[in-house]
Image (tube, grey):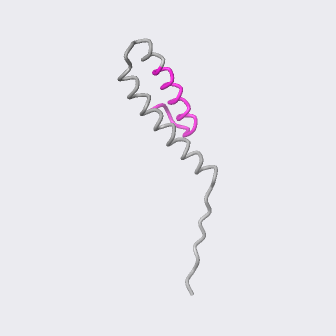
Amino acid sequence: MTAGVIFHVNKEMTMTNENAFNIECTIEELRLEAREAPTAEERRLIEAELEAARAELAKQTGEGLP
């Protein structure tokens, strides 16, 4: 007879990791958009979104801004 292993998944932790991953993807997309922005005004708007996403990631992970 083999010993069974039971894994308990902390759903809250999984959601936090998934949320952090999604925010990291958004940050990367915003970085690319800011680099390709056709006008300074559009770049400023995208950079404001980027800072908000970075702040949200820091809040989710409990770390400093990337």
Q: Position of residue 25 (x, y in %)?
A: 46, 38
Find residue 34 and report its horizontal and vertical position in percent.
Answer: 40, 23
Q: Is residue 39 left or right of residue 49?
A: left
Q: Is 53 included in the stretch rendered in magenta?
A: yes
Does 25 appear in magenta? Answer: no
Please tell me which residue is depicted at 56% across the width and 38% down the height of the picture.
Answer: 62
Residue drawn 54% across the image and 29% down it: 55
Q: Main secondary structure of the magenta part?
A: helix
Q: Is residue 13 left or right of residue 39?
A: right
Count every numbered label the image shows and give the total.
0
The answer to whether residue 52 is above or below residue 10 is above
| Magenta part of the chain | 46-66
Snapshot quadrant of residue 5: bottom right
Residue located at (48% from left, 31% from top): 65
Is residue 64 or residue 8 the one in the foreground?
8
Q: Residue 29 versus residue 60: which sits nearer the camera?
A: 29
The picture quadrant where one finds residue 2 is: bottom right
Q: Among all residues in the image, which is located at the extreme bottom?
A: 1
- Quadrant containing the N terminus is bottom right
Q: Is residue 62 above or below residue 7?
A: above
